[in-house]
Image: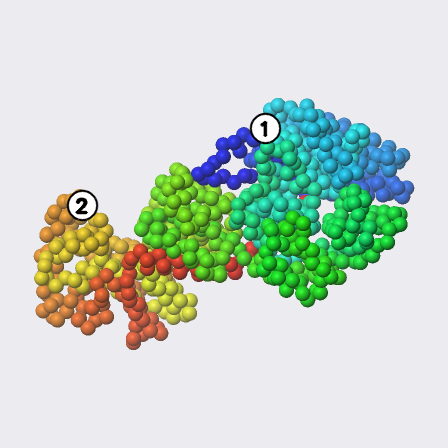
Amino acid sequence: MSRVNPVHTEQANAISTNVHKFGGSSLADSACIKRVLTIVRRHCKKDDLIVVSANGDTTDTLFALFELAEAHDEALSSAIESLKLSQLKLIRELLSIESGQPLIEALDADIKQLTFWLLNQPQQFTNQILAFGEVWSARLLSAYISQEYTASYTIDARDYLIVDDAKHCQVQYEASQQQFNQLLEDQKLAVITGYIGKDSKGEAITLGRNGSDYSATIVAALAQAKNVTLWTDVDGIYSADPRVVPNARKLHRLPNEVAKELGRLGNPVLHAKTLKPLSFEQLPHTVHLHVASSFAPEVLGSEIGSFGEIAKQELSVTRLNDLLLIESEFLKTEQAKIAFEQFSVEQIDHELGFVVVQQHTQQQVTDWLASSNVQVRVTPIALVAAVGHNIAQQGNMFARFKRATKSAKPLRFIQSSNNHSIIAVLKENCTIELLNRVHHAMTKDARHIGLVVAGLGNIGEVFLSMLPEQLSRHHSLENTYLVGLLGSKKALIRDDGINPALAKALYEQHANDYDKAALMEWLGNHPYDELIVVDLTPSEEFSDYYQEFFAKGIHVIGANKWAASADTPQYNRLLSTASETGSLWYGNTTVGAGLPVNYALNDLARSGDKVIEISGIFSGTLSWLFESYDASVPFSTLLKDARNQGLTEPDPREDLSGKDVQRKLLILARLAGFELSLSDISVQNLVPEALQTISIDEFLARCEELDDYFEQAFSDAKAQNQCIRYVAKFAKTSAGYKAEVCLAQLGLSHAFASLTPCDNIFQIKSQWYHDNPLIIRGPGAGREVTAGGVHSDLVVACQTLNKKSKPVEIRGIN
Ligand code: ASP
Ligand code: MG
């Protein structure tokens, strides 16, 4: 589950142990368990460790049996029988007769024992009774893995996990570790029971409801594992409970300390104790915890661990209803502090003398206070909290929080001692409406956008140099981060972001070789809400990646013309994939650099106008050549001159061939809503055939051979008081359309006749712009205007992406 960095693959990760924990709903029936096997095959190595909860709601059923027994209810025996049948059904559906037989025998014996305890001393054997759920579940999964995949064995946590029950289930790590190590077997996959353990006298205990997550992190600490994955039925941790806050976003990466605070404040996926073992002092490294859905294992979940600044900016909002606030002078004492350790009291403030108590501990705490003869004041309350790294130290956040909660007239505000949460204490339960309001106010529903810049040449460099200022200037770019730089062979990818002000230097120092497969893998697993690839390469090969980008929901902004001028089937496939996955594709600078011709055409099409004709001069080089040429010097001299000034491609035949203009015309015609391919546009190559395939040097040596043609064309035009221009023209006709790119004779008053050399001009005739066409004119090439045009696309893309929200599929919790 750990992310692969295409350029920094951590070898050590590949050999370390990982823990995988499967929750009850992931093991609820045979279809679920089959799904789990697929995950095990894909993600578990032989020395990984699997921790399981009881199948489905078996623990609830065991509790129910216990109550029936206490009440001497006659329904007990039939309830036991149906529990047995449900286990038998799983065994029969998953295991062959041969591998199922020992499990059926063991189940028979267990049911006898269970019945005996229930009928005789249910109180004394409560924990032993509850343990059956996890024992059966582990036994079944292990047998199934052995049968289908690889040798496996079970470990009963009562054989190694020693916890101090009175103190929040504190683990005796050293002793537990010794016993744990003795139970491990080589070359076999261990399936370990969650939820249960033993006390120092060896009596069975449980870790509390939903305690298997805690079991998993304890196992990770004991096994020195680097990753723990909680396979559950939600695909991650959200910025608020997505069942009630539709704008909630998945938090892809959450710092440990923030996750702990979220768990403490009632996050339904992260239980308060789960994260404790991850900071176990004796751990020589940081353990990362992943939350993923066993129902959608391909969806990237949330990762909890230690991360850099970007992840520390994540915010979330949570509520806890039906609480009690208990206030007393006594609570300020050291004695109270010690006494309260035994209850899982979620909010304590000794200095101020109050505690906040959750429903399940209310009775316990009030009884205890009553018996201690202490004067207390008890008020029913609720909490709503904003949680984020050091949030309490950010004055503006606190002010925002106060404004957002004002209408609920909070009794008081509390800031947690670790500064990672600010909490409003409310007189009444926090409504869904209030929760949404606070979420919106605190997170601004901001989405984190990652930026990968490909192509670090001329335009790339200017684009990057403009980036820091752009990022700080635009509100919609507030949460946009540069995370990748791709050159033609080397790449620098950083989940934690690349300082854009140092981008070039960081790239030069740290970029490594990369291969396409690893890059694609990272792009499919990046920790951002949205990812934009800014393609500033001229590379056809890179444009071949677009299909995969779009398939992964990645957005593309580019000056690269290849994909937008690909042949019709390929182009349509790109468009349809992008629309299926919601990928944006902006290419304002593919034609006319920053000139807003692409925008104008898009806008006309969107507004309902119909384009009839697009024409103009689309090449800065050819614009310069024909604006400057007056036959006073040979054309070839002018051409070499242009080449020396850097106005042509290194091989000027690329300009003279008209291919580039042809591509641009195709892109524009497509934007206007026409379906055509490059081959549908006729193009006049200004290079005579004899010079087309020779080497550059030879071409430059022989380029006087061009002169006669242009001299003739010029004087023919002049005789009619006209000029020559290299023109592109697409026109709708009654039969369809006509599209061509060629040297044309134009009247001297024609709109294309007198341009500033190098300028482009685009003339659009449409239903609305009919008698007097729309003209866009200006520099159609250049580093600044091109990079600026890409930035303009970036702002629009980020504005659009910030408004997007992804629907969340939720099954239940755990
Ligand atoms: N089976 C136990 C419960 O339902 C433990 C767990 O699922 O985590 O509470
Ligand atoms: Mg559970």
Helix, strand or loop for disc 1: loop
* For residue 323, side relative to residue 604 (left or right): right
Relative vertical location of residue 463 with respect to residue 221 in this rendering, above or below? below
Q: Residue at x 49, y 61 (%)?
A: 475
In this rendered view, identify the residue nearer to me: 590 or 357: 357
First in sequence, mark 2 or 1: give its number: 1
Q: Where does residue 357 sit, x and y in percent of width and height?
A: 77, 51
Residue 535 in view (yes/no): yes
Q: Which residue is mark 1?
A: 46
Q: Amino acid at mark 1?
A: Lys
Is 433 drawn above or below residue 63 in the view shown? below
Which residue is found at the position 30% from the left and 70% from the top?
A: 775
133 relative to 599 in the view: left or right: right
Residue for badge 2: 696
Residue located 47% across and 36% down the image: 9
Quarter of the image where the N terminus is located: top right
Tell me, yes or no, if residue 436 can be seen here: no
What kind of residue is marked 2? Ile
Query: Is 543 on the left-hand or right-hand side of 150?
Result: left
Pick whichever, 116 or 377, lies toward us.
377
Rounded to the nearest angstrom, the CA distance separating label 2 from label 1 is: 60 Å
Residue 211 is situated, as x and y percent measured from the top left of the image, at 72, 40
